Image: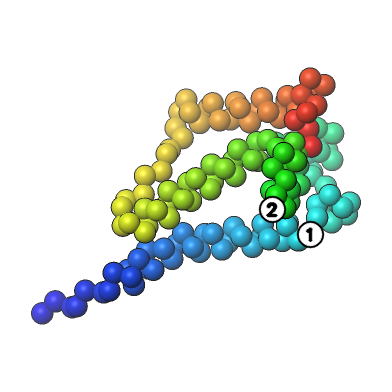
Amino acid sequence: MNAPAAPAHRSAVRRMAAPLAALTAAAAPVLFVAAVDPNTPGRYPVCPFLQATGWWCPGCGGLRCVHALTHGHPLQALHDNLLAVLLLTAAVLLWLNWAGSALTARPVRLPTLRGRHALLVVAAVAAFTVARNLPVGAPLAP
């Protein structure tokens, strides 16, 4: 004899467990950065790359960017770290895709970065890093 089928809402809750766990894991540090202002000196350690080279790394300004976003200042976030805003937007879109797939019991379709596409992403991050450290790229510096 077959076991009775689980109610539909219970299986939806089970399917949403992983996306909600990931959301919770991401929300904890974001809430911390929202509460503890990175613009105040001494609150966070100095970037080791910046300290060693004097150059802004691709992540420099990322904490200030997240802080600005959580306080509803998107233009300030774009100024603090344009790359972080783009990556956070991509992360949110990927999470929404994952959660939507879990809710509807569809297979998750995630884009993959292989070969030329991965090389383009690495080149874009490198170009961003160099540009924000040149006089012409000063608006990209945090």
Q: Quadrant of residue 124?
A: top right
Q: Which mark is residue 70?
A: 2
| Label located before the other in sequence (2 or 1) | 1
Secondary structure of the residue carrying numbered label 2: helix
Residue 103 at x, y percent in the picture? 36, 59
- Does 107 sit above or below residue 5? above
Q: Residue at x 33, y 70 (%)?
A: 9
- Is residue 27 rendered to the left or right of residue 74? left
Local crowd size for mark 2, using a 10 Å CA cut-off: few (<14), some (14–19), many (≥20): some
- Most distant residue in the front direction: 72
Q: Residue at x 72, y 39 (%)?
A: 75
Colour scheme in use? rainbow
Looking at the rendering, in which quadrant would you find the N terminus?
bottom left
- Is residue 38 rendered to the left or right of residue 117? right
Q: Residue at x 27, y 74 (%)?
A: 7
Q: Is residue 133 visible?
A: no
| Viewer-nearest residue: 52 or 120 | 120
- Does 22 sit above or below residue 89? below
- Is residue 140 rendered to the left or right of residue 114? right
Residue 87 at x, y percent in the picture? 59, 40
Q: Quadrant of residue 16?
A: bottom left
Q: Which mark is residue 66?
A: none
- Is residue 12 rendered to the left or right of residue 142? left
Residue 51 at x, y percent in the picture? 84, 40
Which amino acid, by three-letter code, is at mark 1? Val
Which amino acid, by three-letter code, is at mark 2? Thr
- Most distant residue in the right direction: 41
Residue 132 at x, y percent in the picture? 75, 28
Instruction: Quickly name the residue at label 1.
Output: 36
